[in-house]
């Protein structure tokens, strides 16, 4: 477990830098995704161990994903009751991933994480454009929950960047959702896996709280600014349509 002093291991100047990195990451997440490609390297550059960096990143990532999820739920774009099974499997998967990563040696993680960052960066560059129309559903119930929730949730708990895009990809290809609808539901599962992974990191004593809370505020503000900027340009649309159009625009940036 962390000592009291470890909670304040980052200097005020570095905290300020990490705050703005988190704000930028939140803005990027709100319009495209992959903000973790900024925050995880930044945390490791600040001197944190890989496990501490992943844990603290999970705390700050909750700011953007939860704010986006609340936005969609309030506008009745996403129904929690319809997603109970997906939420449960995502929660279990993310907790499993976060548990496993805490048992991987730090030297191994230092070798793995840069490779994962590069791979996810290539994913964003090469991922094909997905459809904007609903298609025939290929998978239902538990099988989908195991793949989209369990597998992607495990990845999010273990590492994280681009998990929201992976959730959206699963909803489009397996559920037949249009891109905008998939984006809204992906935000819900992304928030779920962030919370599940964070709980395991807390139990393992890996979170650097002072840094995490400062970055969480930055992440929340960045995500809110990025998200509402798009919404304000669509004031003539009805709320559900407004959300769908915004979600579609965001994902098109990522998937082109």
Image (cartoon, rainbow, N blue to C red):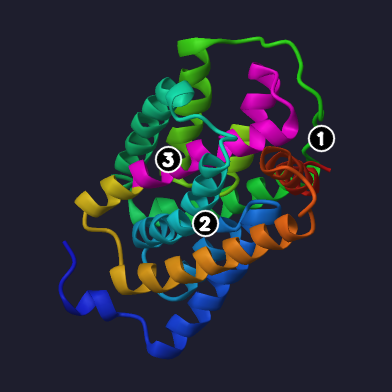
The alpha-carbon separation of the residues under discs 3 and 2 comes to: 13 Å
Among the 4 quarters of the image, the one containing residue 235: bottom right
* Residue 111 image label: none
Q: Position of residue 99 (x, y in %)?
A: 29, 41
Q: Quadrant of the C terminus?
A: top right
Q: Position of residue 125 (x, y in %)?
A: 78, 47
Q: Which residue carries the number 2 mark? A: 64
- Was residue 170 drawn as part of the magenta stretch in this picture? yes
Q: Is residue 25 something that shows in the picture?
A: no
Q: Position of residue 214 (x, y in %)?
A: 41, 74
- The secondary structure type at the circle numbered 1 is loop
Please tell me which residue is depicted at 36% across the width and 46% down the height of the picture. Answer: 195
- Was residue 191 drawn as part of the magenta stretch in this picture? yes
- Of the residues under marks 3 and 2, which one precedes in the sequence? 2
Q: Which residue carries the number 1 mark? A: 128
The alpha-carbon separation of the residues under discs 1 and 2 comes to: 25 Å
* Magenta stretch, residue numbers: 169-197
Q: Quadrant of the N terminus?
A: bottom left
Badge 3 density bin: few <14, some 14–19, many ≥20, Cα 10 Å = many
- The secondary structure type at the circle numbered 3 is helix
């Amino acid at each position: 477990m962390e000592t009291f002093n470890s909670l304040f291991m980052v200097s005020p100047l570095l905290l300020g830098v990490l705050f703005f990195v988190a704000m930028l990451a939140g803005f990027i997440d709100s319009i495209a995704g992959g903000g973790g490609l900024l925050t995880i390297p930044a945390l490791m550059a600040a001197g944190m161990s890989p496990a501490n960096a992943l844990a603290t990143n999970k705390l700050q990532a909750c700011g953007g994903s939860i704010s986006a999820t609340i936005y969609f739920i309030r506008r009745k774009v996403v129904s929690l009751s319809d997603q109970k099974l997906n939420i449960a499997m995502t929660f279990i998967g993310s907790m499993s991933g976060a548990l496993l990563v805490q048992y991987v040696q730090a030297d191994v993680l230092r070798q793995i994480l840069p490779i994962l960052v590069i791979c996810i960066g290539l994913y964003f560059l090469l991922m094909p454009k997905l459809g904007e129309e609903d298609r025939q559903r290929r998978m239902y119930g538990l099988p989908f929950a195991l793949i989209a929730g369990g597998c992607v949730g495990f990845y999010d708990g273990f590492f994280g960047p681009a998990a929201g895009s992976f959730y959206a990809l699963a909803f489009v290809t397996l559920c037949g959702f249009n891109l905008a609808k998939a984006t809204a539901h992906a935000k819900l599962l992304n928030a779920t896996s962030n919370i599940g992974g964070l709980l395991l990191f807390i139990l393992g004593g890996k979170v650097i709280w002072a840094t995490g809370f400062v970055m969480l505020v930055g992440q929340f503000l960045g995500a809110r600014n990025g998200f509402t900027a798009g919404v304000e340009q669509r004031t003539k649309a009805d709320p559900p349509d407004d959300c769908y159009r915004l979600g579609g625009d965001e994902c098109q940036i990522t998937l082109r």
